[in-house]
Image (cartoon, coloured by chain):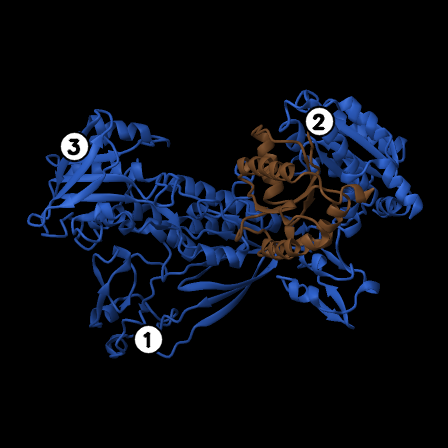
Amino acid sequence: MSEFEPKIIAFMCNWCSYAGGDLAGTSRLQYPPNARIIRLMCTARLDPAFVLKAFAEGADGVLVAGCHIGDCHYVSGNLKAEKRVQMLKKLLPELGIEPERLMLRWISAAEGERFASTMKEFVEIIKKLGPSPLRGAAK
Amino acid sequence: MGDEQGKNRQADEEEPRIGVYVCHCGVNIAGVVDVEEVAKYASKLGNVVVAKDYKYMCSDPGQKLIQEDIKENRLNRIVVAACSPRMHEHTFRKALEEAGLNAFLVEMANIREHDSWVHMNQPKEATEKAKDLVRMAVARARRLEPQHKPKVKVKRSALVLGGGVAGIQSALDLADMGFKVYLVEKTPSLGGKMAQLDKTFPTMDCSACILTPKMVDAARHENIEIITYAEVEEVEGYIGNFRVKVRKRARQVLEDKCTGCGLCAEACPVEVPNEFDHGLGVRKAIYVPFPQAVPLVYTIDDEACLGCGMCEAVCGPEAIDYEQKDEVLELEVGTIVIATGFDLFDARRKPEYGYGRYENVITGIEFERLVNASGPTGGKLLRPSDGKEPHRIGFILCVGSRDEKAGNPYCSRVCCMYSIKNARLYKEKHPEAEVFIFYMDIRAYGKGYEEFYRQAQEEYGIRFIRGRPGEVVEDPETKNLLVRVEDTLLAMPLEIELDLVVLANAIEPARDSEKVQRLFRLSRSADGFFAEAHPKLKPVDTLNDGIYLAGTCQGPKDIPDTVAQASAAAARAAIPMAKGEVETEPIVAFVRRELCIGCRICERTCDFGVITMVERKAQVNEAICRGCGACAAACPTGAMQIRHFTDEQIYAMIEAAMREEREIAVKEVEG
């Protein structure tokens, strides 16, 4: 049996984390290919429903990444995202989803290294947790 | 124009006809990802009319390929699977526009930075990922809508914040180009840190001699309005139309009446330490920071003033006005240059060197003031403890720079050179003196710098000791200082007794950087200095359109680099003003009125005050909306949306990421 390969949806802000991902690429930092990134202008755009939708579709993990606190291109979008993620982490267990399947990280445009290590770390976490309990339900 | 818009509207109404273009990027992508297979896969996706792979999509023939297909196959949506959209999105947007299609009908799948380059040893998985990313892009492309970039007029005036050499240079350049400039400075005079320096390396020009003519030029320029003793309180608006509130503090001296004669200061009985000389000398409660101040207008230091009336009594032109109030000015400007400079590392944070405890440990800037002819000692370097001329002097470099413990891993870029310069200055006057420089590495990178350093070693006999001193200890009787250091070239511990120690303390972000960052919505890099939009290609732009950076507020630099950057910032700031109008981002919020229930959650969520309630429904002021999407995420009904990032577009990507195409097709049929 082949090893479980998690499917991960990542929401990233255009200015910091998506650019950090670009830098990881330019620097040829290797990391596991499990995440599919959806670019938002700011993590402020992260409707909690997007995260729930991703889990409902069977995602094994959801990663949200934005600018470091104080660095938001739009003043405080990342603080709003942080609150929403905290709320979701409380809500997810009610739906039978481990809160560890949702991760929030601040990754700046200069942190290609942190981008790659976050990807590695999150894939490891999800591999340990195994497939999402909602995986089959989606289809 | 009408025709073009007609075509744009077409895209809105017609069934999507999508073209997918998979780029090889030479071997950058094709060396890992099976691009042919990805293109073949894409051709099977719904609404995809053509799918091709090509060596370099961004090349001229690559773009032509898309443009021809748009015409021949009546394509109305394009997906380019290539590099990051941050790299070439604008290239393909232009290509679409040239082919008569709205620029926003292209979607990019990032299969290079986010795929082939980061999964180089997993070609199979990388190819699968590329297919997923293309499928997601196609799903989003189906729902893309044409967007129109609104044009706004640009005011032909600029704000330059900070009156140091950077701000002065930017202001002069902009003013010479014919634009009105408001040059706002926090302290009572222009000049900044450069005005405090004695000589400048490596040419040994007197700093004031090269700076003060520029200050006077700025004061005389018909297009420059100098506003000193003033700080920005509020910034509203956006590129082309910033509204800036400036509080001009009351100096209690009328600027238009004061002649700068100085009789008031002579009469004033109050003496306080002079900031300009770093507290080494004194000034009166009514003062100018230094004799060549611009404007040459006295200022009453409110905290020190006793209100005795002596100054008023002697002032011929009746310029003293104790009742003067702060004035709030409202400036309207098209662009802004930030030139707020730096502050120095507080050397007390390195207690091992004894600054603040030992009288004969001073900083580089204090040395500058002490050797300056207009300084507190009339240009004679005397030991603070006994007023004697020092014979043995040591300069310690990297005090708070290149120092993780101090929180500053960066190099301050000027300390090597100004310390060598100061060492040479002293040796010139006192050839018999023994001068040591304690360094980790000497960074002499500029024009003529290495030669200047060589001369210091070979002709001046200055002794360079490679090692960061561990501590400085004072002899309580003689007040001499013992420097303990390991000479790392000889691998030998040394103890050197000195009469005077000069610390090259680091350049740090100005203390009010955080306030300036908030006011102007800038970002800062890890070192705390303001971040440029791109380190190589947009070195003086910020991520806030219409605002540019000059000088050390962006990072430590010497005078030549500061002046060059200030001219660059001025040139960049002039572009929108010269054009007269700019296109702004169409990625802003809009309201689906039929869904809005008037709950006002969006209004409270918005950081920019762009949402108002009109007839109990939310309304967006698109001109000032920045498009972050906080309102859309908070809206409970889906009424609030962001153009180009609608709920449907994002949901489509989530579904496409998780499901194969046919499952979505089935769902759509069922739904």
Percent x, y for residue B476?
A: 9, 50
Residue at 78 percent of width and 59 percent of height:
B638
The three-letter amino acid code for the residue at tag 1 is Ile
Q: Contact (CB < 8 A) between labels 1 and 3?
A: no
Classify residue B115 by image quadrant. Answer: top right
Label 2 sits on residue: A2
- Which mark, by number, is residue B320? 1
Classify residue B58 by image quadrant. Answer: top right
Residue B315 visible within the image: yes
Percent x, y for residue B52?
A: 81, 26
State how far apart marks 2 and 3 are (Cα). Answer: 64 Å
Task: Give me the chain letter of mark 1.
Answer: B
Q: Is residue A54 left or right of residue A72?
A: right
Chain letter, brown in picture = A
Which element is circle 3 on?
A: strand
Label 3 sits on residue: B494
Q: Is residue A102 left or right of residue B455?
A: right
- Which mark, by number, is residue B469? none
The three-letter amino acid code for the residue at tag 2 is Ser
Foreground: B428 or B109?
A: B109
Q: Work out whether disc 1 and disc 3 sit on a shared chain.
A: yes
Percent x, y for residue A130?
A: 67, 38
Select label 1 or label 3 by which is in front: 3
Task: Give me the chain letter of mark 3.
Answer: B
Select label 2 or label 1 by which is in front: 2
Q: How busy is the neighbourhood of tag 1: few (under 14 within 10 Å), some, or many (20 plus)?
A: many
Classify residue B424 by image quadrant. Answer: top left
Task: Give me the chain letter of mark 2.
Answer: A
